[in-house]
Amino acid sequence: EVQLVESGGDLVQPGGSVRLSCAGSGFIFSDHHMDWVRQAPGKGLEWIGRIRHKGRGYTTEYAASVRGRFTVSRDDSQNSVYLQMNSLKTEDTAVYYCSSSAEGNCFDKWGQGTLVAVSS
Amino acid sequence: DIQMTQSPSSLSASVGDRVTITCRASQGIGNSLAWFQQTPGKAPKPLIYAASSLQSGVPSKFIGSGSGTDFTLTISSLQPEDFATYYCQQYKTYPFTFGPGTKVEIK
């Protein structure tokens, strides 16, 4: 079964840090670009970052709202992608989804999401 | 950044109806457009990529069309499971951006 499973969501104080993980199974993880998308409570979807696969040099892209604070990384030996979130703000409160994209496709697999709440 | 707009923001329809949702990009994106369906508390479900290609397992009642700046998603013969919020997304240029969503409700 094709699956993406996120973990690591938590209640964090403003200025704090958290690391999210996303584990893939049932597909060739190393051939896929991996993205993080978030959804604040009652709001729409916001793309926040991508890490390309090895063939594209593991290069990354970020939304302006998180650049310099969030870092996307991956470990293909563990079929996992990570989102390191630093200097958290209350507006970072959201459900965070990971998603995978094969070459020629786009966001074709999604995890169930993990909630990060930033509050004092 | 490329801005994505959707219309209408919400609509009411009956089971069996055919509905069309429009998505517009603030600049040309070729066919680099995807559609997603989301029900409350669930992850987005991918429906269409490359403007008109169905994702695996998605029924053919979902029809995507368009290129450049104007795109549509048509759902023929609405069923109870189709009542949801639909988002378009451009993946031509970073940052990837989503439309604000269209909520399809039961009349």
Image: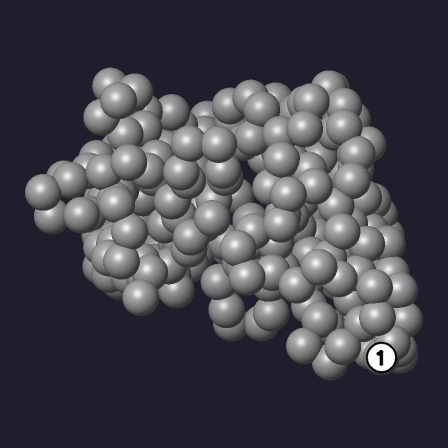
Q: Residue at the location (24% across, 57% down)?
A: A25
Q: Residue at the location (40% across, 48% down)?
A: A99
Q: Residue at the location (51% across, 23% down)?
A: B94
Q: Identify which amino acid the numbered label 1 is placed on.
A: Val
Against A15, residue A49 (above or below) is above
Q: Is residue A80 left or right of residue B19?
A: left
Quarter holding the N terminus of chain A is bottom left
Q: Is residue B32 left or right of residue A94?
A: right
Q: Quadrant of residue A118?
A: bottom left
Chain under label 1? B
Against B48, residue B66 (above or below) is above
Q: Is residue A109 visible?
A: yes
Q: Is residue A70 visible?
A: no
SS label for mark 1: loop
- Name the residue beneath numbered marker 1: B15
Q: Residue at the location (53% across, 55% down)?
A: B56
Q: Residue A17, position in %: x, y?
A: 21, 46
Dot 1 surroundings within 10 Å: few (below 14), some, or many (20 or more)? some
**For this rendering, which residue is in front, B55 or A93?**
B55
